[in-house]
Amino acid sequence: MADMNDKYLKVAWSAEMDRGVKRIEPFVDRLMFAVVQAQDVRKASQALNAAGLLVTQLTSTGGFLGRRNTTLLIGMKENQEELAVKLIHDKCRQRVEYVSTPLEGAPLPIPVATPVTVGGATVFTFMVERYEEI
Amino acid sequence: MKMIIAIIGDHDNESVSQGLIQADFRVTRIASTGAFLRRGSSTLMIGVEDDKVDEAIQIIRERTTSTGEAGVKRATLFVLNIEHYSQI
């Protein structure tokens, strides 16, 4: 394990020197999937990046409203999990949106605005058995 | 069963997927954008038998090309354990 860490330290160091960016050494043992609303993506991934976490964005669609959202893949160390969840919690708000649904029992489909609570974020964390950068 | 999640640059997408498919791996491609590869990237989900993980990673290693920029990774790989797998 010790030399594995050394290897990744080197990768981090060279990346740091080239970009002039300070980032946390990228040894990773957790992979988090966070499904966030389109409005919150930029803020959330900026905050995660600033904390030195590796973020990849996948465009996705929610099942219920069919709204566009984004799935963030975030690689991290076990002890960064809490921080990542906190950042996502801070940046992703729950909102009430209105969808139009037909009025029940009416002879004609009269649209009625129905409130639906959307967002926050959905977070899944997986254990990473092996992590590599090529 | 393991799942390899490989994040690679768009320019390597075709070559890596072809290589994996030729070697009988099942690959799902997702278009993505990455903060660390910075431009368009592709995320590959590859379901593999436990003893084939190294073979798949070897293919990815051989088929990814460097952009020439120093400090830019060619690929990021996560290997996850899969509790249940079935093809229907």
Image (spheres, grey):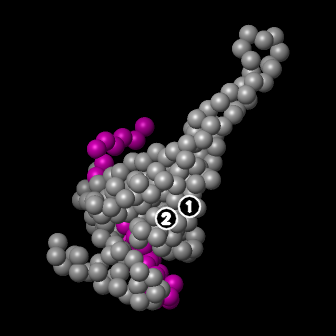
Q: Choose between A94 and B38: the one closer to the eye.
A: A94
Residue most extreme to the right: A108
Residue plotted at (41% across, 80% down): A22
Q: Is residue A129 left or right of residue A23?
A: left
Helix, strand or loop at mark 2:
helix
Point 30% across, 70% down: residue: A27
Q: Is residue A95 left or right of residue A8?
A: right
Q: Chain of mark 2?
A: A
**How many angstroms separate mark 2 from mark 1 (CA)?**
6 Å
Identify the main secondary structure in magenta.
loop
Which mark is drawn over residue A47?
A: 2
Q: Is there CB contact under 8 Å for labels 2 and 1?
A: yes
Amino acid at dot 1: Lys
User: Disc 1 marks which residue?
Assistant: A43
Residue A55 seen in the figure: no
- Near-viewer residue (B84 or A92): A92
**Residue B70 sits inside the magenta stretch:** yes
Q: Position of residue A61 (x, y in %)?
A: 59, 46
Helix, strand or loop at mark 1: helix
Q: Which residues are magenta?
A: B59-88
Closer-to-camera residue (B7/B11)? B7
